[in-house]
Amino acid sequence: MSGYFNYYKIDTNRTSINLLQKLTDVKLPPKKHFYFPDKLISNFKDYITEINKNSIFTPLSFEEIIFKTKTDFCKINHFEFEAIINWIDDYYNDEIEDIEAFHIDLGFKEILTLHSRFENGILSIGEDGLNIYYQKIAEKEKLSKKVSISVPSNAREIELVIDFLIILSIKLITYNIEAYSTEREELIDKLKSIEENKLLTEASNHFFDILKDEKNDYTKLYQDTIDYFIESAESFLYAMQDFKAEITNYDGFIFREDRF
């Protein structure tokens, strides 16, 4: 399936002022919208009305979206966020030259783009890998933790999955580099520097064995995504390092835009 996934971090000070102003402006000239080409839609409230008339969309409340935007944007759910960004991008598309700067001014900064369902699926593999291990040691360690990256996601839980995937990516790359090389040694040194978290290291070792076992039920179920991960481990490693850099000092929530 073609499309892409954009991940955003949020500046609630800007969403509560700049974005709120856009969403509540009822004096905008009518325009056609991508999802409703036969309609002229004047403002965000009208757009939500059209969404609620169409059964293929999840019903939304304009009043609830406005209240959350005004008081605490991080309570916005995935469908509300997608409605906001779809309307903003489509309505102002012919007026804005720098969409990234426009987004930042409204309070959401794009921090990662994944270009296929396989790339996005690797994040889910990271979530699964940690939870499979946590379940394995839960009784022994008296650990009840479960990681979730369902959007919107807590930045700290996303960061935990990122760290896990960074370790796993390096393991995949070095596993496929048979002979000695400067690249392999540099990656091994990098791995040593981030393996201080014993839990993550043990979890990645456990899951790495699962990925190598082609007869494993999990591996067979997600074979296409796993194959993609193995083939693109190096580029995905760099993407995860950039992703981590964007959220290391960020304590809010991560939102995702799905475009198909």
Image (cartoon, rainbow, N blue to C red):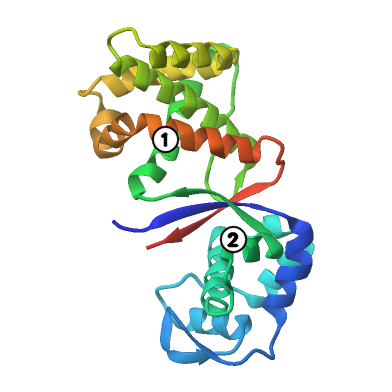
Q: Amino acid at mark 2?
A: Glu
The answer to whether residue 137 of the structure is visible from this angle is: no
- Which image quarter holds the C terminus? bottom left
Residue 81 coordinates in the image, percent (x, y): 58, 63
Q: Nearer the viewer, residue 61 or 211?
A: 211
Q: Nearer the viewer, residue 187 or 240?
A: 187
Against 181, is 145 above or below?
A: below
Residue 247 coordinates in the image, percent (x, y): 64, 39
Q: Residues within 10 Å of mark 2 (few under 14, many from 20)?
A: few
Which quadrant holds residue 37? Answer: bottom left
Which disc number belongs to residue 135? none
Q: Nearer the viewer, residue 173 or 50?
A: 173
Q: Amino acid at mark 1?
A: Phe
Counting residues from the start of the chain, the first of labels 1 and 2 encountered is 2
- Which image quarter holds the N terminus? bottom left
Q: Which residue is mark 2?
A: 100
Q: Which residue is mark 1?
A: 236
Residue 255 coordinates in the image, percent (x, y): 58, 53
Against 66, is 111 above or below?
A: above
Against 240, is 38 above or below?
A: below
Q: Identify the element where label 1 is drawn.
A: helix
Q: Is residue 231 left or right of residue 164?
A: left
Residue at image location 42% in from the left, 35% down from the top: 236
Marks 1 and 2, Cα distance to the nearest angstrom?
23 Å
Q: Is residue 241 left or right of residue 129?
A: right
